[in-house]
Amino acid sequence: MIVKNEEQFLERCLKSVNQWVDEMIVVDTGSTDRTKDIARAFTDNIYDFKWINDFAAARNEALKHASGTWILILDADEYMEENDIRGLRDFLAGEKPSSKFVYRVTVRNFMDSSNHTGISESPILRIFPNRMGFEYYRPIHEQIRLSSGSSYEIIALPFQILHSGYLEHVVAAQNKHDRNMSIFEQMMSRTKLNAYDHSMIGQQLSMMRKSEEALPHLKIAFENGSKSSPWYLNNLWTMLDVYLQSQKYIEAWSLIDEHMTEYTDYPDIRCVRGIILLSLGLREQAKQELVLAHREAENRARLNHNIALVSPNLGMRMPLWLLAVTFENENNFQSCIHYLTLLLRADDQDIEAWVKMVEVLSLNESAANIAAFLNRLLHVDAAPQKVIAMAKISISLGNQQLAQYYMNRLPSLDVLSLSEQLRYALLSKNLTVFEQCLMNRASDGLTDSAAVKMVILGSIVWSRPEWIELCNQTLTDESIGLQFARNLLQPDRAGQRDPSFDPVATDLLSQLYFLKAWDTFDSLIDRFSSAAVINQLANVFLAKHFVQPAMQYYQHLLDHNELDATSCENLALLHAMDGKIEEALEFWEQAISLRPEAPIRLFIQYCFYCKDSHDKSEMKARLAEQHPNDAKSALIQGL
C-alpha cells in the first residue's frame, strides 16, 4: 500500500487483514501525522518515497519491496471483512502463480446521503502474482500491465473490499479533489487523452459536483470507448448520475432506453427509471418501476445473485423509501407505513425511516399507540440509544406527548443538545425550564446555530428581547434571524415591515406553528401577510399535511390573484389526486404561464392528464418551444 497522512483510517485497514497476510509493505509519500507510527505497530517494512504526482510510480516502488508469492493492493481508507480476506487467502492457496492471470474483486464505496446512490460498487484489479513482470502505469487511476507488453486474462473473484474514502468529509480533509485534478491537468498538458482518461476526468469532476464540466469528458469516453472495456459501464453510470444531478431527466431516460437496455432488469436501473418518472410527475408509472425494482432485488437476494448493477442502495433501500414517500405525498398513509415497515425490518438502524415513520404516525395516532407500535417494530424501550434517538426525533417533529413519553425514559437530560432542550421547553410551554437551560449555557456564549434559532423563537414567544443579546452576533446562518427578532421586539418598529425579512419570517412562522405556539403565530401572521410569505407558508403546511390551513391560505391567494407557480403546481396535484382533472389542468397551465421557462414536468403532467387532443397538441407545441431537444424523446412522444 501507499499512504500519506492516513492516521484516521490506517489502523482499521491493517487490523482487518493482519492475521491473513504474510507481510505488509507500506510506502509513505510524505506523511506529517501519526501514519508511520501506526504502521510500525504492524510491520517494519515502511519505506519513504518522494511524491512526484504519480500514483503508478509510488505503487511500483511498493512492489519492489514485496517478497511474497501474491500481491494484494489496498488503500488506507479501505478494509476487508474477515470472510472476504480469509476466503481470498484460501482461494490463492490453491492457485498457481502465472503471468496469464490478474484477479478482480469488488470495491464497495460508501457515499454521503447527499449522493443518491448511497453505496456504489466497482470491479477493480487488486490481486496478481509477484515477480512475474506486472507493473503499474498512468499517473492517476493507475492500471496494471505486463512490462513485456503481453496480455492477460481477468478472473473475477467473489470477494469485497470496503471503501470509505468517498465520504465528503474525508475528501475535503485530504484535498483529494485538488490533488487529483492537478495530476489530470499535468496529463492534459503533456499528452493526448484517450477515452479512458476522459472517463476518469469526467468521474472526478462529477464527484466534485461540476456536472457541466464533467459531461463533455464523459461523452467523449462514451463515444470513443469500447463497450467491452471494464471501465465503460462505470462511465455510463456516471453519465446517468450527472444527468440526474443536472435535472436532465429526459437525457437520463434516453441513455437507459437507448444504450443500457441489457441492464434494465437490474433493481438499481429500475430504481433510476423510477426516480426519473417521479421527477417528471409520472407517479403511477414510477410506482410500477419501484415495485418491480424491489421484487427483483428480493428475488436476486434469494438466489444469491448480484443485487445491483452498480449501487446496492438503489437496488434495495431506495425503491422502498421512494414508494413510502410517494404514497405519503398522495396521503395514502397506510401504504406509506407499509413500505417504511419493510425498510425498518431490513435495517432497524435506518434513522431517516425512523423520522418519517414518527412523522406519518403523528398525523393520526396517539402518542401511546405510536410508542407501542415502535416498540413492537424496533424494540425501542429495550435499547437506551433508541430511546434517546426517539426523544430527539419526537422533539424535532413537535410531538410533545410522544417526546414526553421518551423523555421520562432518558438517563439524563444531558444526552440532549442545548437546542433540543430549548425546543422541548418551547413545546411544553415551560418558560422556567427554557430560561434555566439558557442561563446555564449563556456564560459560554451561544455559538451553535440550532440553539440560536431556538433562542430567537423563545424570545418572540415570551417577548424577551434581552435573550437576543446572549447569542453570538457573528453567526452567518442566523444573523438575519437575530436582526429580524430584534426589530420585531422593538415597540417603535412594531408597525414596520421589511420585505427582505420575508424568508426568515416564513421559517419562523412555520416553526411557531409546528411548536403549537398558536397565540404568537396568530399575532404575527397579519404583520407578515405578504403574498410571498403566504405562498411559502401554504406550501410548507401542505408538505407537512396541515391541509386545512394550507387550503385557507391558497384560497386567500386565489381570491387576490396572488398564487405563485409553486402554489399553482401544488394545487394542480391536489386536484388531480381528487379526480378534479379540469381544475388541475387550469392550475398546471397557470404554473407554466407564471414561469419564463417552466420545468418540463409541468408540461408532461398536463399532457398526461389532458384528454382533449387539441389542448394537448397546443401544450406539446409549447413544450417543444421551451424544451426543443427533450420534445424529440420517445417518452414525450408517447404522451
Image: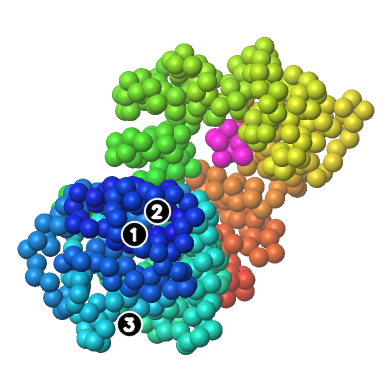
- Give the residue at mark 1: 46
Q: Which of marks 1 and 3 is in front?
A: 1
**Of tags 2 and 3, which is closer to the observer?**
2
Q: Position of residue 377 (x, y in %)?
A: 31, 28
List the residue tagged with mark 2. 36
Place residue 527 in its image quadrant. Answer: top right
- Residue 501 higher or lower than 174, as above or below: above
- For image coordinates 32% across by 20% down, the residue present is 382
Residue at horizontal 12%, vertical 62%?
Answer: 92
Residue at 42% x, 36% y: name it.
Answer: 351
Task: From the image, tell me which residue sits under label 3.
Answer: 226
* Distance Cα–Cα, label 2 vs label 1: 8 Å
What's under tag 2, amino acid-wise?
Lys
Q: Do residues under tags 2 and 1 come within 8 Å of each other at their CB atoms?
A: yes
Tell me the CA gap for discs 1 and 3.
40 Å
456 relative position to 349: left or right? right
Q: Distance between the residues labelled 2 and 3?
A: 41 Å
Q: Tell me the kind of residue under disc 1.
A: Ile
Mark positioned earlier in the residue sequence (2 or 3): 2
Magenta span: chief secondary structure = helix
Q: What stretch is highlighted in magenta?
A: 540-548
Sequence-wise, the earlier of marks 1 and 3 is 1
Residue 544 drawn in magenta? yes
Q: In this view, does 593 lie to the left or right of 544?
A: right
- On screen, residue 161 above or below 528: below
Q: In this view, does 430 lie to the left or right of 159?
A: right
- List x then y, in percent, for residue 232: 34, 75
Q: In terms of secondary structure, where does tag 3 sit? A: loop
Splitting the image into 4 quarters, where does residue 440 fall? top right
Please give the name of the residue rendered at 44% of the width and 49% of the height, measured from the top-left corner: 34
